[in-house]
Image: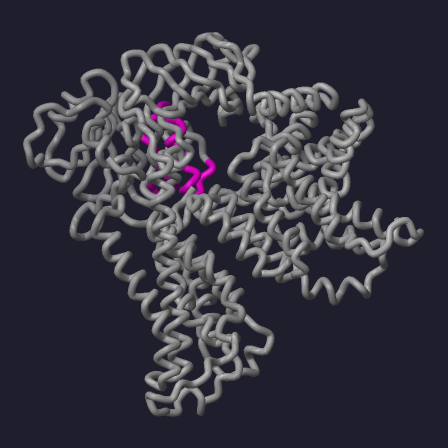
């Protein structure tokens, strides 16, 4: 997850002013006596501006997340003043124009600009309010001992271990005021046996610590993610899970029913195809093995097993289309007359999507997908276009109001990128489709939509996950149509037939579809060069890419070339320049020369042959992240074997420049040895505290005590000396 930061979209304040037809030069500039009240122009001043609402909100949210420290009183005073000024400008613009004090064109621009400022400030306020709302204690130290809590979630870690999430936590000798609201523990192999049901209070012995910060400056900040999830501690356990109270009733029976359905689907279908089918319908991914996750990622099909707008849209679309065709057929034989079949089908599709939301566990991503689908189906009920930029903008606005942190999540960005790309494709497709054979249209539509969605989301996926599936488009073209025409419809039919015990054939068909998708994933992942590592982009790239693409889409019109230059043309040019700038920054960016882990357990030095790490083991997750963000496919052992480091395995040293060296000391006594080696033009890193350093040490010294304040560190050697960048930034919560 990367915070959307950087320069805001230039056209936000200026582009909409071009969408004001009918404002003649004479009307805009002619002077009039102050006592003559002119009539207000037509509502054209508001036409086409609503899609900019979520853009402005996003800019404010992005500014809040990009702020280098937790916004304090000064920030909010300035933001409040700007918001008030924008509001006053928007309110006074029309009366001033009616009195002839200002021209109508300037009035419209002032009103639009003022409201844009208000929305930007509102976005920052939403992020601040959300952060304060989810505030909960975070464990600030290592804890070992009994952990008691209510089981609320079961999933799998990246290391293929069962993970339990507990709330209502009790820790030994820890006051309630300092106890995290939620903790998550990975169960080692010996503890991953029979698990208690959701809603049951359990106890186990755990090793807990605070959520980790970024592996390097600019890397994914799990600490920030955990804050908005209410997760105050993470760790592991090697002991069995013991039940200390009976499972709670209430809504928990629904969650237990969902898990029971998942287990039944896995048993009926069998194997990993059953686990994938259960994940598609119930959101329970605990049965999917890491090997399956790996091939799905390598083939760019991982999005299939993570419920998103694609799944919700396919399910709702199937229900809507099937029911509407059935009702139209009933009208054709005279069974029903005068019924609004499209509205009935839309209402049924919303009901089906609501049931799917419950069945899938109601996670944040699923809720986001439901909002998108519900808004589009609601447009049908309101006799509006279901697929338009306005409906997408409304869905985005609702999501940003409810959970502003969604803006910086890959799921939000990729879902809306794919949806907007499909909307832009709808016009050309509607003109092409009537010329095609009737039987070919559905299949070709799925192929086109898969291609368009893959092209729209590939840059975002590469930026977030630092990998590019070279044959991901092929995999999606082969798998997504099967999911849309076979898997999801069979899942709906199975759900309808399950109460009468006739779900078996539908589940069998569903298993055929998931088996095909797994075979496609394995085939594509096994191709030579299936996955290419991509270097992580600098922080401004994603904001420039996102806001530039949105500005270009909202400012582009087919008649733009024929119209005189104006704000729309300027906005389009600005958007294209932002896109070009993001690409240039990404392609020309250099990776940090030296990286130091947050606990001092690893040091990485960039060399002509790639990053060389100081040791072949230890800090494996951090080192793997470094290499991945470098666009490097080497293992830690291969990285450590590159020529750079010398010395004993506990006392490593490497030459950085002709004048500077970096030394890494680990193991017992590393602090003492680091103190003795602290000399000018040396970067000294120790895995133990360095005691006895002077107030101004002659070297650059880093130990766990100092790194605890800074987080992971990157160092670039410049002419004026080392340039140090810390990953700590700000805490996402007030002290």
Please tell me in which quadrant of the rendered image residue 262 appears: top right
Name which residue lies at 7% across and 36% down. Answer: 696
For the magenta stretch, what is the residue range?
605-633
Counting from the top left corner in percent of width and height, residue 414 is at 54, 48
Report the residue that reaches farthest toward the right.
333
Residue 85 percent coordinates (x, y): 29, 65
On the rendered structure, is 109 left or right of 468?
A: left
Q: Is residue 201 left or right of residue 206?
A: right
Q: Is residue 364 left or right of residue 307?
A: left
Q: Position of residue 715 (x, y in %)?
A: 25, 42
The quadrant of the picture occupied by the N terminus is top left
Q: Residue sitting at 11 percent across and 23 percent down?
A: 691
Q: Nearer the viewer, residue 313 or 714?
A: 313
- Give residue 629's quadrant in the image: top left
In-image side of 533 versus 316 (left or right): left
The residue lying toward the viewer, choosing from 307 and 168, is 168
Residue 625 among magenta residues: yes
Query: How many numbered tags mark residues here?
Result: 0
Is 313 placed above or below 282 here?
Answer: below
Observer able to see residue 114: yes
What's the image's color scheme? one colour
Q: Position of residue 714 (x, y in %)?
A: 28, 41
Q: Is residue 252 above or below residue 421?
A: above
Residue positioned 68% across, 54% down in the render? 381
Q: In this rendering, is residue 651 above or below 384? A: above
In terms of depth relative to the viewer, which is nearer, 484 or 633?
Answer: 484
- Quarter of the image with the C terminus is top left
Please check the rendered image and state whether residue 355 is part of the magenta-colored stretch, yes or no. no
Q: Is residue 296 visible?
A: no
* Quarter location, residue 501: top right
């Amino acid at each position: 997850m990367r915070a959307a930061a950087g320069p805001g979209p230039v056209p936000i304040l200026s582009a909409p002013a071009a969408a004001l037809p009918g404002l003649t030069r004479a009307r805009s500039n002619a002077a009039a006596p102050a006592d003559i009240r002119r009539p207000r122009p037509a509502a054209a001043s508001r036409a086409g501006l609503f899609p900019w609402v979520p853009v402005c909100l996003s800019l404010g949210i992005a500014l809040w997340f990009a702020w280098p420290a937790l916004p304090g009183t000064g920030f909010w005073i300035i933001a409040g003043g700007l918001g008030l000024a924008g509001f006053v400008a928007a309110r006074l613009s029309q009366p001033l124009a009616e009195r002839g004090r200002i021209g109508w064109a300037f009035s419209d621009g002032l009103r639009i600009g003022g409201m844009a400022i208000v929305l930007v400030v509102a976005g920052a306020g939403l992020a601040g309010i959300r952060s304060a709302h989810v505030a909960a204690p975070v464990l600030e130290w290592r804890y070992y001992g009994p952990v008691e809590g209510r089981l609320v979630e079961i999933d799998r870690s990246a290391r293929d271990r069962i993970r339990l999430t507990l709330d209502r936590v009790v820790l030994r000798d820890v006051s309630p005021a300092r106890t995290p609201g939620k903790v998550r523990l990975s169960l080692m192999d010996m503890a991953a046996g029979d698990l208690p049901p959701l809603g049951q209070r359990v106890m186990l012995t755990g090793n807990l610590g605070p959520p980790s910060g970024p592996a390097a400056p600019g890397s994914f900040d799990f600490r920030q993610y955990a804050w908005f999830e209410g997760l105050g501690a993470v760790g592991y356990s090697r002991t069995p899970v013991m039940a200390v109270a009976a499972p709670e009733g209430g809504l928990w029976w629904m969650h237990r029913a969902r898990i029971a359905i998942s287990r039944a689907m896995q048993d009926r279908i069998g194997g990993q195809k059953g686990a994938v089918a259960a994940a598609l319908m119930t959101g329970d991914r605990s049965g999917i093995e890491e090997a399956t996750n790996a091939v799905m990622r390598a083939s760019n099909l991982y999005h299939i097993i993570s419920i998103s707008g694609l799944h919700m849209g396919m399910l709702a679309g199937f229900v809507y289309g099937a029911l509407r065709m059935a009702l139209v057929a009933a009208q054709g034989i005279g069974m029903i007359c005068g019924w609004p079949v499209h509205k009935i089908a839309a209402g049924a599709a919303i009901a089906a999507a609501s049931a799917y939301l419950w069945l899938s566990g109601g996670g944040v991503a699923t809720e986001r997908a439901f909002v998108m689908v519900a808004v589009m189906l609601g447009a049908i009920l309101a006799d509006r276009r279901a697929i338009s930029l306005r409906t997408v903008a409304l869905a985005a606005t609702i999501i940003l109001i409810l959970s502003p942190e969604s803006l910086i999540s890959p799921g939000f960005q990729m879902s809306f990128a794919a949806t907007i790309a499909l909307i832009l494709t709808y016009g050309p497709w509607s003109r092409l489709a009537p010329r095609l054979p009737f039987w070919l249209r559905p299949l070709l539509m799925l192929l086109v939509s898969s291609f368009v969605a893959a092209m729209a989301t590939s840059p975002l996926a590469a930026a977030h996950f630092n990998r590019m599936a070279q044959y991901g488009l092929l995999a999606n073209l082969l798998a997504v149509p099967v999911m849309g025409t076979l898997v999801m419809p069979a899942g709906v039919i199975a759900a309808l037939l399950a109460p009468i015990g006739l779900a078996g054939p539908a589940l069998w068909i569903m298993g055929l579809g998931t088996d095909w998708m797994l075979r496609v994933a394995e085939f594509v992942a096994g191709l030579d060069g299936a996955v290419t590592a991509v270097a992580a982009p600098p922080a401004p790239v994603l904001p420039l890419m996102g806001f530039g693409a949105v500005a270009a889409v909202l400012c582009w019109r087919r008649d733009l070339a024929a119209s005189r230059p104006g704000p729309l043309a300027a906005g389009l040019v600005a958007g294209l320049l932002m896109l070009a700038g993001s690409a240039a920054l990404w392609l020309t960016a250099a990776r940090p020369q030296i990286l130091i882990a947050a606990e001092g357990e690893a040091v990485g030095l960039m060399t002509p042959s790639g990053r060389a790490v100081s040791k072949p083991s230890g800090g494996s997750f951090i080192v793997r992240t470094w290499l991945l963000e470098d666009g490097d496919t080497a293992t830690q052992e291969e990285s450590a074997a590159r020529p750079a480091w010398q010395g004993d395995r506990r006392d490593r040293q490497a030459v950085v420049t002709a004048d500077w060296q970096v030394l890494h000391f680990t193991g017992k006594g590393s602090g003492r040895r680091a103190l003795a080696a602290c000399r000018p033009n040396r970067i000294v890193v120790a895995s133990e505290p360095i005691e006895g350093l002077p107030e101004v040490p002659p070297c650059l010294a880093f130990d766990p005590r100092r790194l605890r304040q800074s987080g992971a560190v990157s160092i670039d050697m410049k002419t004026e000396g080392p340039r140090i960048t810390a990953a700590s930034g700000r805490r996402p919560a007030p002290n």
